[in-house]
Image: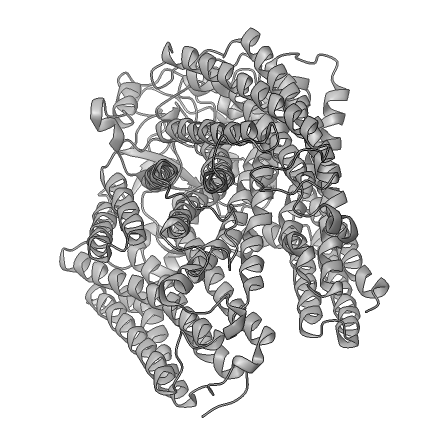
Amino acid sequence: MDRRQPVDQAEQSHARLPRAVGQRVARTGGLHGVAAVTPSGQEGTAAARAAASAAAEPSETGFDTALYARFPTRGKRPPGELAALEKAWQTPAGWRRFSAVNNNFIGFLFIVTAFGFFIAAGVLSLVMRVQLAAPLAGIVPQETYNQLFTMHGSVMMFLFAVPAVEAMAVMLLPQMLAARDLPFPRLSAYSYWAYAIGGVVFFCSIFFSLAPDGGWFMYPPLSDGVYAKGINADLWLLGIGFIEISAIAGAIELVVGVLRTRAPGMSLLKMPVYAWAILIFGVMILLAFPAMIMVTFLLELERAFNWPLFDATRGGDPLLYQHLFWFFGHPDVYIIFIPASAMLSTMVVTVARKPLVGHEIVVLAMIATGFISFGVWAHHMFTVGMPGLSAGYFSAASMAVAIPAGAQVFAWIATLAASDKLQRNTPALFLVGGILIFVMGGLTGVMVGMVAFDGQAHDTYFVVAHFHYVLIGGMLFPLFAGFYHWTPMINGRPLSERVGRWVFWLSFVGVHVCFLPMHLSGLMGMPRRVDTYLPGRLWELPNLVSTVGAFIMAAGALLFLIDAIRCYAFSGKDGGDSAGNVFGGGTLEWLPAGNYSVRSIPVVRDLEPLWADPNLAADVEAGRYFLPNTATGARETLITSTTKAEPQYLQIMPGPSWWPFLAALFTAGSFLLLTVKATGLSAVCAVLTVFCLMRWLWENDRHLPQKQVDVGAGILLPTYVAGPQSHGWWAAVLLDVVLGVIFLMAMFSYVYLFNAHPDWWRVPAPAGAVLPGGLLLGAAAALAYGARPVMARSKRGSGLSALMLLLSAVALSAALAVDVQAWWQAGLRGEASGQGASVYAMLGWHASVVVAVVLSALYYVLRWVRGLAPGPANKTMEAIRLLTLFAALEAAAGLLLPRVLPWSFT
Amino acid sequence: MNAAALMPGRTLATAFVIWFVHFMLCWAASEFWAEDAPATWLAWAFTAAALLAIGVHGAWLRSLGRHGEVDQPTLRIARGANAVATVAVLFTALPSIVWRA
């Protein structure tokens, strides 16, 4: 990482942060001639003392934290200021509403859509339960049943669980951090539309008997071209891959949001537990989901081109699929659980009206859970015959991960126990019920974490019971608690308390009636994924009871749906004007808010700021903190530093746009048309996608005439920053991390197959490509690296840097061509062996990155031609430069690995 | 972005990264030398190295605390992470001690 200050990197005067920030405007009489800056004689106040204490600590950015003592300011704000703010953040009306990008609009749509998928997948499960209620029932044929359980699992995991927690984060996080919005609102919109369009098309496949039927994990060989003919499996592979892209886009947004848009003063340790969870959640998605992208890519390659990546008879290995799938699949459970657990932690505090017991331990537990969850994936594979020692390692890690999860449970119980004025309401019921159900699921999780026990229970209904307890207790109940808890924040009025109690008890009783007997039927030997069973095995009664339980749960969900429609359809709040803090929450999402989020961005000094300062809400609403207006007339938010949340610059945010929607539409079209082999139309959609993405980005990255603006109390901040200080730079780095992990998975596949079937490594690596390939890659890296200093130092730097990026992309393409040609001439063929398949899979993935680099370079040249690539630095150049450097590194790894392992050359 | 900005992330994540690397190396050895003695010996070697790395990291944390380079709450969590990682490393190594092919 380049740690120099932006001014040194960019040689750009307004990037000189430490000197630019924290300076008071020359006029001392007040802001805009009306508002007064809090005089220095306020040192006796709590705010001033806190500011003085903050100032005593070394600054992270050079910002003078003593300036926090100026807040809250005094006096009335200028008339028309609020109206201007409202106008800038207005959501388009009518059909133009679909071009809206505000987090409260997109987040709400996200939640509604995810809940819709939950109901739809729940209906599928009811059909399955009816089929299993009695032996030899003939409600649905076996083929349909296979599609039902595949779609139930896939929809619940990919279209409900992860998107629902992500949706809650999109909705809650900016309010909780007192940001105006997430840092890339159009990316949120793209993420949502990609998910909604792709998800609906994917789900509708079941109505045309095109739904996949190989289980939600789609193991080969069951899902390969031999055993799964037709397009059902392709629909799953491309549909899920597409939805993963949406999840990753959302995760980048959320991670940057947590790290860079917190309210001033909200240091990492004053950050709500929920924000910590979203940070961990986002990082986990960025590290785990690439494995899923790679495994779907590999399986599609096998199906489309007959490359034997998972075919053991030609040097592939079906266990490679399982390793890659579960490297994503098991962390995915924690990806769902961690944010939901943090919702519990947040609500427990409000319900108990006490600070969270062991706040730091809970944070540590979430970090530990996030890490250890990456060491447990193969406990899903205990019965595949892996080495005993390997199984031992995964068993140990599986049990270890229960410890941090348990620490959180104890923290919740202790917080509730410490309270002398517990709130007994529907959210409280759901959170206590959720804890109980989760603990029960966690205990059976420790049981199946033992290799010997798992050998008995594997693929039986015991496992079905276990993971439903974990997911319902660890995610569904917290989510329902969250619906009840935060509805007043969204809607201005709560859901019905009376109906809520009915919903809770129906759900709670239904869960146990449905899933508790499954432990028994599983231990009695009933396998999963069977569409029927013979009578006389004593499975009839537990199955009948489970079916009754499923309908009790469904009644609860239906009741909730009716109440939610009633509550939201007759909302008195359009876009939001009152927080409706009916439960007495202490975190910032309970501040009065509108489309612009909070009226002014407060200085945060506590974990529960609303409890610590009873006047905070009134002061924020009166505009007495940061950014009480729109300083430039556009949508804006404060970008703060990563650790101590010191104000760094003002981000100008993009407004409503159709481009994210259209880009998502064409991306979905491109992916889904591939499934029906309409390659021409798919290519057209891909081109249109690229056009929409470029058109969307075209409007971003503009320099404003105002280099600095007053963000409140006379504090000046720059309006444009490039390089590592910029939030866009962080997003670019995260994208490169994702691409890097995807390629690591490709390299892992190569090494794994070589270790499993070295006898199929029959083509010696062509050494002749190393020198020319290496030189070209060196040139590509040097050109990309030099683009920034050339732009900053040369008079014609802008054009030269564009040329250098273009030449770099050409060199990368040439290096790829050299490598591919060398392998081809050496006689390596993708369909011939695991060696050929894994080498060409690596190169194929790298080729897609090179295409992205070439398109980006062309886009940048176009920007330069139109005068939109000004020096001495700009964010677009920084992002493309990072991508190009990454691509060069990736190419070097792809060039060397197959030549080093095995060590044989021609 | 200065070094101080990255310090909390580094202090919190390092111990767990050591655990993860240790875990992956132990697992890779057990896959390459399935049921063979080198997998066990390597696991012990990796465990010794991981414990050493955690010790060095602990000393670094102590030094940070003495010089006031990281605030106390972050330091407390980082020390907790170090303790958890130590237990996790030992727990991971346990199968290599008890397992007999």
- Seen as rendered, the residue at the extreme bottom is A906
Is B48 above or below relative to A596? below
Which of A312 and A630 lies nearest the eye of the viewer? A312
The C terminus of chain A lies in quadrant: bottom left
Q: Nearer the viewer, residue B21 or A860?
A: B21
Q: How is the image coloured?
A: one colour
Residue at 67% over, 74% down: B32
Query: Does residue B8 lie above or below A103 as drawn?
Result: below
Q: Residue at x 37, y 13 (%)?
A: A569
In the image: residue A563, left or right of residue A503? left
Extreme residue in the top direction: A498
Q: Is residue A804 left or right of residue A320?
A: left
Q: How many marks?
A: 0
* Residue at screen point 53% across, 32% down: A128
Looking at the image, residue B39 sits to the left or right of residue A295; the answer is right
Q: Out of A45 and A374, give the one closest to the viewer.
A: A374
Q: Residue pushed farthest left?
A: A866
Q: Residue at x 64, y 18 (%)?
A: A428
Residue A293 screen position, x and y as percent:
44, 55
Q: Is residue A457 left or right of residue A624?
A: right
Residue A874 is at least partly visible in this image: no
Q: Is residue A228 above or below residue A104?
A: below
Image location of residue A352, percent across then percent down: 68, 18
Where residue A817 appears, as percent x and y from the top left, is 30, 78
Residue A313 seen by the camera: yes
Which quadrant of the view contains residue A348? top right
Q: Position of residue B35 (x, y in %)?
A: 76, 71
